[in-house]
Each structure stands twice: as C-alpha cells, then as structure tokens.
Image (cartoon, grey):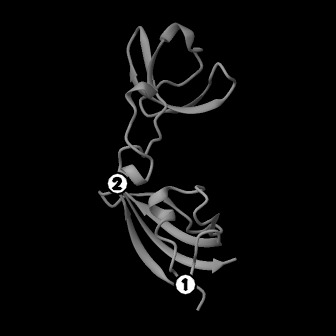
C-alpha cells in the first residue's frame, strides 16, 4: 500500500466541526478536496495529519486554533464612519461583506458592531480562535 508523503497530490472527503458539534464545512455532495501535501494549500494541522495515510483510511483530526486559522488579531477590526457606507449595504450583525484595500486587494470582512456613528468590521477569518475537528477519508493519492 502506498502511503502519503509530502509532495503527493491527494484527494480527501472531509467534514469539519466545531467544539459544539456544529458542521462548518464538508465535502459531502461535492468532489473531494484536492491539494498537495506539505505545500501550505490547507491549514497546517490538517496538512500534517496526511503523511502515512493510505487510500481508504479514515481518521478524526483535532486541530487547535493555532494550527488552523490562528488567533484573532485585534488590529484586523476597524471602525468605519457609518456615513461612508452606502445606504444599500446591509449592516446586520454577522453580515459578510467585501472591502477593497488601498492596494486594490479584495478582503472579506464581517459586520461585528453597528452604532449610529460607526460600523465595526472584522477582517479576521470567521474560524480564527476556534479549535476544529475534521473527519477525513483519503480517496486517492496522485
């Protein structure tokens, strides 16, 4: 049996859950996730669990926040004057928006606070600070 090693292209089916058991992502009903092991294409904690697996293997991988999307960065939260946001933009808490940086890069943000004067946007990944659990199955190597 061929075992996964760094540099191999693999395909996995997965279900990602939070500590409360809720699913945040899954490949169910979709094609398997394909990536190159050790290339940094997926979070480190999941990438590091791949070597040694063989096709058909299933395992549950617990990934601490530091090996997933990291800890929230307070500097990634920014208050914007409400007057600068077009009236047709929804500002409900939890709404995902996209903003453009001065360099022209598009960045996803989440509305985390709204007052009459300001809207606070958070550019941290929605899963930052969260420990994750993945149930994975190795579908193919190569």
Residue located at (37% from left, 41% from top): 71
Spot occupied by residue 114 in the image (x, y as percentages of width and height): 40, 19
Query: In front: mark 2 or mark 1?
Result: 1
Q: Quadrant of the C terminus?
A: bottom right
The secondary structure type at the circle numbered 2 is loop
Q: Residue beneath label 1, please?
A: 54
Residue located at (57% from left, 63% from top): 38
C-alpha separation, residue under disc 2 versus residue under disc 1:
26 Å
Q: Residue beneath label 2, please?
A: 131
Residue located at (43% from left, 77% from top): 59
In the displayed structure image, the side of residue 88 where residue 62 appears, left or right: left
Q: Residues within 10 Å of mark 2 (few under 14, many from 20)?
A: some
The secondary structure type at the circle numbered 1 is loop
In the displayed structure image, the side of residue 41 where residue 136 appears, left or right: left
Q: Earlier in the sequence, mark 2 or mark 1?
A: 1
Spot occupied by residue 66 in the image (x, y as percentages of width and height): 38, 50
């Amino acid at each position: 049996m061929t075992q996964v090693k760094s540099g191999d292209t693999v395909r996995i089916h997965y279900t990602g859950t939070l500590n409360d058991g809720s699913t945040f992502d899954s490949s169910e009903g979709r094609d398997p996730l394909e990536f190159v092991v050790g290339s940094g294409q997926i979070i480190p904690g999941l990438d590091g669990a791949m070597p040694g697996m063989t096709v058909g293997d299933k395992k549950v991988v617990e990934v601490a926040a530091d090996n997933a999307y990291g800890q929230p960065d307070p500097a990634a939260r920014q208050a914007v004057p409400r007057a600068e946001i077009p009236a047709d933009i929804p500002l409900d808490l939890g709404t995902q928006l996209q903003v453009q940086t001065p360099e022209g890069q598009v960045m996803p943000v989440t509305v985390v606070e709204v007052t009459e004067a300001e809207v606070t946007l958070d550019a941290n990944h929605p899963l930052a600070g969260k420990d994750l659990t993945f149930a994975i199955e190795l579908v193919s190597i190569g």
